[in-house]
Image (cartoon, rainbow, N blue to C red):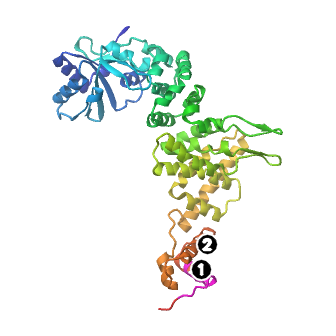
């Protein structure tokens, strides 16, 4: 179908007029399609990328457009995919020839043939992404909407243009994309398309970890990530992608004692942290902070349910999870592992009398990540009891104030011992050996416990006393 509404004003800009002129000179038709059109109609913030489909060679069109632009921007050509890209001002514009696709069962990489605009719209993942605006002189700005995507935008529906089983089986990543768009836009997935995701869930196994993680990151970075993870759970994709999370679901009962459902608690924590950080790795930390609870869950007749050591176990599980999904194994993985391992430390402090020594140890172990750790732990307060909620948050304020006071006084965050190993060797005439490590550790512990301030003179005097217990004497020069 064709919606005769004109959107001339929406495409009344220099770059689109240049594309129109270049298309005319090459005697081909061109259209702006996909996300730009969708977000334009939704009045969403414009993202800095535009997709142009040419009924002909997308590469030739890109080269011609570059030729006609004042600074003749460089064109990146991807011959394998028949696409080309150039940057105009601060926008990336990708050109592709209209095509039709067919798939082999064991791959999401299509067999591509030249096609019409209709063929190209047929291959799009969702009706709302198949919308196109003409850049041709004859009908410039006209909306081409063969699947009534405009109606789906208005009713907030994610739906595939063709049979959803074929759409998802051909390219299983589209299942993740459906859930991601539903989360980003706060849309519903049309019932038959949602059922098709569950029917085709096993197909996700042919998708690389990197592609899956890219979609998970986009879900995590939404305003309410739980919407996406509940859809992943409902369609059983989550069982395949992140079984560590679904293992947390359920409430066990033994001798009348139960524990909270740690899966739904986790989703609350992720939603709680979302407004407070744009850091995807801190959001991953929230998502994974309790994954050690499933393997450590135990019931004791006297004390009820426990998850002893779940932070340590969870921290170790992070590395295996990152390896399986081909996520970065660098400082990002170490950061998430550290956050998971330390996720209960401030909570324990907030429930007890806050001592200076406990705060010093917390700051020493967390280092530069102490603010992120406190943000994570505050997000972890999901109690529905208003009195407890208020009490925990007030206690966290006390912990935060103590952190400021201790840091100002003792400079623990970037801890460096006032006494170096070289000075210890020189003072006692020692060669490298275990005594140096013993003395350095003793000085550090004394500072963290508040026995001595983090200053040179008290540390030096403490060192002499401790060394004497080890039978070491100060050498005379």
The residue segment tinted magenta is 459-474
How would you classify the magenta stretch by its main secondary structure?
A: helix
Residue 464 counted in the magenta span: yes
Classify mark 1: helix, strand or loop.
Answer: helix
| x, y percent for residue 379 | 60, 44
Q: CA distance from mark 2 to mark 1?
A: 9 Å
Relative placement, left or right, of 126 versus 440 is left
In the image, 416 versus 5, the foreground residue is: 416
Residue 124 counted in the magenta span: no
Rendered image: mark on residue 462 = 1
The earlier-in-sequence mark between 2 and 1 is 2
Question: Is residue 154 visible in the rendered structure shown here?
Answer: no
Tag 2 and tag 1, C-beta contact below 8 Å: yes
Residue drawn at x 71%, y 59% is: 353
| x, y percent for residue 446 | 61, 72
In the image, 125 versus 433, the foreground residue is: 433
| x, y percent for residue 278 | 48, 42
224 versus 425 height, above or below: above
């Amino acid at each position: 179908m064709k919606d005769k509404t004109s959107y001339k004003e929406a495409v009344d800009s220099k770059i689109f007029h240049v594309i129109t002129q270049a298309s005319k000179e090459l005697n081909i038709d061109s259209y702006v399609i996909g996300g730009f059109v969708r977000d334009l109609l939704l009045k969403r913030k414009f993202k800095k990328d535009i997709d142009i489909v040419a009924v002909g060679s997308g590469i030739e069109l890109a080269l011609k457009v570059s030729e006609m632009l004042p600074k003749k921007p460089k064109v990146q050509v991807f011959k394998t995919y028949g696409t080309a890209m150039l940057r105009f001002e601060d926008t990336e514009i990708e050109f592709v020839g209209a095509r039709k696709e067919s798939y082999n069962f064991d791959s999401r990489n299509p067999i591509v043939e030249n096609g019409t605009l209709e063929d190209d719209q047929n291959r799009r993942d969702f009706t709302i992404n198949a919308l196109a605006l003409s850049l041709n002189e004859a009908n410039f700005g006209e909306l081409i909407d063969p699947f009534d995507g405009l109606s789906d935008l208005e009713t907030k529906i994610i739906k595939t243009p063709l049979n959803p089983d074929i759409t998802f089986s051909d390219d299983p990543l589209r299942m993740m994309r459906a859930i991601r768009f539903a989360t980003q836009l706060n849309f519903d997935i049309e019932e038959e398309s949602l059922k098709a995701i569950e029917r085709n869930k096993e197909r996700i196994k042919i998708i690389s970890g990197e592609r899956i993680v890219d979609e998970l990151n986009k879900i995590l970075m939404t305003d309410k990530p739980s919407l996406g993870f509940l859809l992943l759970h409902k369609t059983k994709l989550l069982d395949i992608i992140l079984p560590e999370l679904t293992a947390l679901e359920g409430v066990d009962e033994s001798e009348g004692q139960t524990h909270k459902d740690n899966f739904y608690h986790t989703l609350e924590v992720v939603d709680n942290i979302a407004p407070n950080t744009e850091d995807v790795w801190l959001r991953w930390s929230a998502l994974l902070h309790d994954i050690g609870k499933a393997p450590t869950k135990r019931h004791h007749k006297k004390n009820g349910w426990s998850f002893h050591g779940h932070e340590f176990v969870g921290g170790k599980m992070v590395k295996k999870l990152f390896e399986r999904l081909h996520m970065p194994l660098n400082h990002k993985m170490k950061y998430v592992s550290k956050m998971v391992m330390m996720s209960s430390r401030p909570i324990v402090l907030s429930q007890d009398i806050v001592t200076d020594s406990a705060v010093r140890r917390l700051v020493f172990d967390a280092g530069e990540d102490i603010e992120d750790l406190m943000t994570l732990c505050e997000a972890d307060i999901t109690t529905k009891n208003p009195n407890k909620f208020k009490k925990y948050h007030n206690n966290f304020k006390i912990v935060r104030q103590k952190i400021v006071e201790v840091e100002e006084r003792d400079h623990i965050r970037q801890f460096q011992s006032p006494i170096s190993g070289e000075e210890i060797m020189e003072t006692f005439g020692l060669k490298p050996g275990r005594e140096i490590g013993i003395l350095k550790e003793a000085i550090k512990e004394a500072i963290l416990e508040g026995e001595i301030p983090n200053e040179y003179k008290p540390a030096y005097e403490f060192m002499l006393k401790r060394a004497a217990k080890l039978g070491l004497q100060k050498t005379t020069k």
